[in-house]
Image (tube, rainbow, N blue to C red):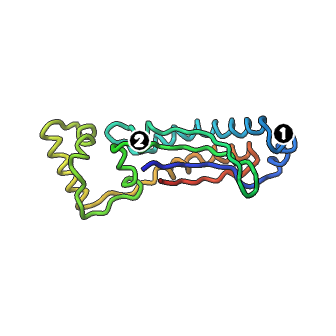
Amino acid sequence: MPFTLEIGTSGITLLSQRLEKITGRHSAERDRIYIEVLSELGVKLVPRLRHETPKGTTGALANSTAFRTQIDQDPETNETIYSLIITQSAESGQFIYRPITVTGRKSGRMPPPLALRGWVELKWGLSGIQSKKGAFRLARHIAAFGTQPSDYVEKAVISSAEDIEVAANNLGHQLSVEISDF
């Protein structure tokens, strides 16, 4: 289940109005400035998100973190919308723990021990039959106590508040943050 962190422009400030007067409403120079500022923000946010992402056996979820910028037109107002979109790809079965990491897992049901074996080998340093037994013990523990939720994306956004504010000031717009799983 992939997720998207979208940071988009909203609200027009005096600085934004002045920039529009200088560059024009639909200007390649204005687009370049907005995309450049959002790209600089992306370069700062991606490492923080990678750092906050819980590490599985390979760290593949954290390493799949990437960003892109996007320019759209609002069909109703015809205003240009600039967005920074940060994603973590979750198309592989090995990423199935993301939704469980975010929401936590209630006690009661035992997860499949085979799914935990790689983590046990890496984190506990076990191998062979010992890793199989360790995975089973961990699965029983999770069944008994569950797991705590961890909204690591929110932590990354909060730790980046100052950079988001600087980017908003540079653009003369408010920046809205939207986190979605799909």
Cα distance between the residues tagged 2 and 1: 40 Å
Q: Say which amino acid is labelled 2.
A: Leu
Q: Residue at x 51, y 41 (%)?
A: 48
Q: Residue at x 58, y 46 (%)?
A: 160
Q: Label 2 neighbourhood size at 10 Å, few (<14), some (14-19), many (20+)?
A: many
Q: Say which amino acid is labelled 1.
A: Thr
Between 125 and 100, the one nearer to me in the picture: 100
Q: Residue furthest right?
A: 21
**Where in the figure is residue 43, as x and y percent of width and height?**
58, 35
Q: Which badge, 2 or 1, comes first in the chain's sequence?
A: 1
Q: Which mark is residue 61?
A: 2
Query: Do the CB atoms of the residues marked 2 and 1 lie less than 8 Å apart?
Result: no
Q: Label 1 neighbourhood size at 10 Å, few (<14), some (14-19), many (20+)?
A: some
Does dot 1 land on a helix, a strand or a loop?
Answer: helix
Foreground mark, 2 or 1?
Answer: 1
**Where in the figure is residue 74, as x and y percent of width and height?**
71, 53
- Residue 132 position by quadrant: top left
Q: Is residue 99 left or right of residue 168?
A: left
| Disc 1: which residue | 23
Q: Residue at x 74, y 44 (%)?
A: 171
**Where in the figure is residue 89, as x and y percent of width and height?**
45, 42
Q: Residue at x 58, y 54 (%)?
A: 178
Total number of numbered discs in the rendering: 2
Q: Residue furthest left?
A: 129
> Is 13 located above or below residue 92 in the figure?
below
Does dot 2 land on a helix, a strand or a loop?
Answer: helix
**Where in the figure is residue 62, as x and y percent of width and height?**
43, 40
Between 103 and 72, the one nearer to me in the picture: 72
